[in-house]
Amino acid sequence: MVRNAKLAREGDCVSNDELFQAAVKAAGMAYSKYSGFSVGAALLTDDGKLFTGCNIENASYSLTNCAERTSIFKAVSEGYVKFVAIAIAGSIDKDFSKPCYPCGACLQVMSEFCGNDLKIVLSDGVYKLSDFLPKRFSEESMK
Ligand code: THU
């Protein structure tokens, strides 16, 4: 875990570029021997802490965990459940200029812990969770 509480207190949290570069760095840890596609995510909590994650593949392919969920599960397992931004960087050849859009499973997991205005930082711009998931299944759906 990287501490960014000072930056967060200064108002603008971590810059989008810093967050994206943290995701690129996290992609360096990808365990992606089957697809060869490396993904990194950098997740910022509401109190300025940064959790990173990478994709973790498995010989039983469907057990693969995406980078986004790795970062979220790391944070939640350490007691952080409110997030304000996530950067995602993916590449097959270390060129991270092509956007890596989050998969549906990761969007659903994000939605459990984040409001519609969660910032999603990609190489082609900054989005909100609601751009990708305008309607969502949640605990409200079950009432
Ligand atoms: N992957 C992620 O880590 N995040 C995504 O949002 C999309 C896909 C990973 C899973 C797998 O290891 C590889 O990319 C190819 O699908």
Image (tube, rainbow, N blue to C red):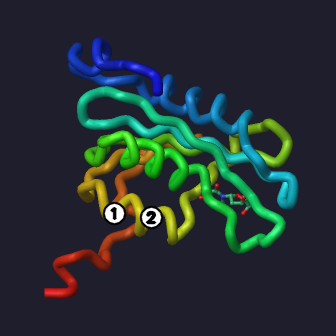
The image quadrant where one finds the C terminus is bottom left
In terms of image quadrants, where is residue 103?
Answer: bottom right
Which residue is at a point 41% across and 50% down the rendered structure image? 127
Q: In this view, does 25 lie to the left or right of 43?
A: right
Instruction: Check disc 2 and report its element: helix, strand or loop.
Output: helix
Q: Which of 17 and 110 is in front in this view?
A: 110
Could one spot residue 107 in this view of the protein?
A: yes
Which residue is at a point 38% across and 35% down the rendered structure image? 44
Packing grade of label 2 (10 A; few <14, some 14-19, many >=20) is some
Q: Name the residue under label 1.
A: 111
In terms of image quadrants, where is residue 58?
Answer: bottom right
The picture places residue 26, in percent across and down from the top left corner, at 64, 34
Which residue is at a point 78% across and 37% down the rendered structure image? 95
Indicate whether 94 appears above or below 114: above
The picture places residue 112, in percent across and down from the top left corner, at 31, 63
Q: Which labelled disc corresponds to residue 142?
A: none
Q: Which amino acid does label 2 sit on?
A: Leu
Packing grade of label 1 (10 A; few <14, some 14-19, many >=20) is some
The picture places residue 134, in percent across and down from the top left corner, at 32, 71
Could you tell me how far apart the alpha carbons at marks 1 and 2 are, in whole angstroms? 6 Å
Indicate whether 5 appears above or below 42: above
Q: What residue type is labelled 1?
A: Ser
Q: In this view, does 47 lie to the left or right of 127?
A: left
Instruction: Check disc 1 and report its element: helix, strand or loop.
Output: helix
Q: Name the residue under label 2.
A: 107
Indicate whether 62 appears above or below 1: below
Q: Nearer the viewer, residue 94 or 124?
A: 94
Q: Are marks 1 and 2 in contact (CB under 8 Å)?
A: yes
Q: In this view, does 40 lie to the left or right of 122?
A: right
Indicate whether 63 appears above or below 90: below
